[in-house]
Amino acid sequence: MARKNSDDDPLAPVTLAVGQEDLLLDRAVREVVAAAKAADADTDVRDLTPDQLQPGTLAELTSPSLFAERKVVVVRNAQDLSADTVKDVKAYLGAPAEEITLVLLHAGGAKGKALLDAARKAGAREVACPKMTKPADRLAFVRGEFRAAGRSATPEACQALVDAIGSDLRELASAVSQLVADVEGTIDVAVVGRYYTGRAEASSFEVADRAVEGRAAEALEALRWALSTGVAPVLITSALAQGVRAIGKLSSARGGRPADLARELGMPPWKIDRVRQQMRGWTPDGVAVALRAVAEADAGVKGGGEDPDYALEKAVVVIARAARSRGRG
């Protein structure tokens, strides 16, 4: 669940949502929009990407209206705004307009830090939306989802849900919603088992995600868990191949909006955003090395080697190392 500061008024002049967890960022936006529409059903909502917020655009959007309408202006990926647009935003932070709520979504890293610092200095309401990389964080998220729904779930049921679904917060939130809607009383591990038997195969994609992100230790942990729960090795090599190929496809594609790239590459837009984050440490040579490792692992698990588990572990380590190849000289 996103963490908020003590001054938690969704209609504060400026809300700063910081982090890289897409679900939490989207929820931060929805909360502000819902509060604005509750105050004025005719609220005008503008949801903008950095390329849509050119110098002068913010001044146009926040200029006084003849009808004094309420407005929500959402700026996504604020860390990618141009220098001139950042100047506009900083100027606005010093004198925000009435009846207008500005929502800045910022990844929270070093890029665009001056804008992040300026928003905090101006007293922006802040919502923390950190990426949940640790299993304990995802477990706490699931527990929080059940509490928010006013329902009780046993600790074992929460753990079983995380084990079955994996690391995707949207899928975890959707699973909680389904269980809450379909099941009466306390949700226990038997209920989770009935609904999500077989979902453990999704863990193969968690192995791939962690590997292409260069997180070798977490990838190996996920690999060992997947193998121990009976996930077929061939599913894991397939997921590794898909992950590395996606990196290669996107790195060689021309720039553009996620929707345009999705059509060009045959990927859903949400995957374009995820792969963009994953490909930061990759080089073309790294992709080639990783693809060879996947091919060797695939041969190993299909009878070309004596120990399929070792073949997979070796591939995961090579891929994770390749993911950090940029800048190693």
Image (tube, helix red, strand yellow):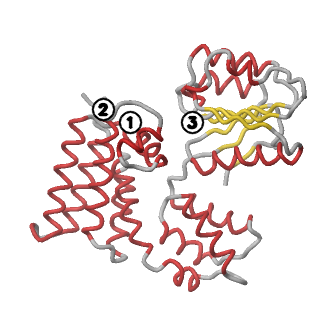
Indicate the position of residue 39 as horizontal and vertical percent values.
Answer: 89, 44
Where does label 2 land, which residue?
Answer: 326
Relative to residue 317, is residue 219 drawn left or right? right
Please say if 199 is above or below 25: below
Please say if 269 is above or below 256: below
Indicate the position of residue 129 as horizontal and vertical percent values.
Answer: 63, 45
For the point 60% across and 29% down, the residue is: 78
In the picture, the disc for residue 237 is: none
Which residue sits furthest left? 304
Which amino acid type corresponds to the residue marked 2 in the rendered image? Arg
Q: In the structure shown, which secondary structural element does the residue marked by tag 1 occupy? A: helix
Where does label 3 land, which residue?
Answer: 107
Judging depth in this view, the residue of 253 and 200 nearest the camera is 253
For the point 59% across and 77% down, the residue is: 157
Q: In the structure shown, which secondary structural element does the residue marked by tag 2 occupy? A: loop
Indicate the position of residue 23 as horizontal and vertical percent values.
Answer: 60, 51
Q: Which of marks 1 and 2 is nearer the N terminus?
A: 1
Relative to residue 232, is residue 15 drawn left or right? right
Which amino acid type corresponds to the residue marked 1 in the rendered image? Arg
Give the quarter of the figure containing the C terminus.
Answer: top left
The Cα atoms of the two marked residues, 1 and 2, are separated by: 8 Å
For the residues labelled 2 and 3, say whether their Cβ atoms are less than 8 Å apart. Answer: no
For the residues labelled 1 and 2, say whether their Cβ atoms are less than 8 Å apart. Answer: yes
Where does label 1 land, which residue?
Answer: 280
Judging depth in this view, the residue of 264 and 240 nearest the camera is 264
Please say if 240 is above or below 75: below
